Image (cartoon, grey):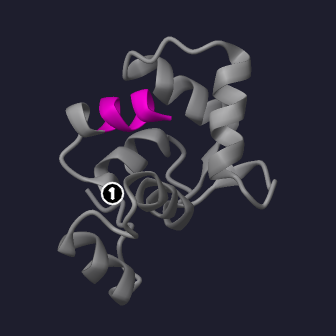
Amino acid sequence: MELFWKRIDQRFVSLQKAFRYFDVSSETKVSFYEFQQGCTKVGLRLSFEEQKMLFDKFDAGKEGFFTYDSFVRLNGDHRGTFLRSEEHTSELQSHSFISYAV
């Protein structure tokens, strides 16, 4: 888990951008397949079992996908805080944190 968040911090300026990178289908949720692809693209060399274990932490409801909320929540749990910046607080309050407009 530590390696995952370290790589996310190195690669992306915000959690929103990281989530959008994984959400290839732009459905505001990330499937296991998208997660696998994203991990590979950011240079995480994880076994299938490691990918599945990590994905299952995000997909706490066992729905086969995870949302931005669970992505942020797990990041906060990992860091010992709910959110890592004021930007994410305002995103959650407005409920308009995912925008795929170009």
Q: Which residues are magenta?
A: 1-8
Residue reaching furthest bottom?
A: 93
Compared with 2, 56 (above or below) is below
Image coordinates for residue 68, horizontal then vertical, percent = 49, 61
Image coordinates for residue 91, horizontal then vertical, percent = 31, 77
Magenta stretch, overall SS: helix
Horizontal relation, residue 33 to residue 35: left or right:
right
Residue reaching furthest front?
A: 80
Amino acid carrying label 1: it is Gln
Q: Residue at x 57, y 34 (%)?
A: 35
Q: Residue at x 35, y 45 (%)?
A: 18
Image coordinates for residue 12, horizontal then vertical, percent = 23, 40
What count of labels does the image hold? 1
Residue hosting label 1: 16
Magenta run includes residue 5: yes
Horizontal relation, residue 5 to residue 58: left or right:
left
- Find numbered disc 1 in the image and state the secondary structure of the residue it sits on: helix
The C terminus lies in quadrant: bottom left
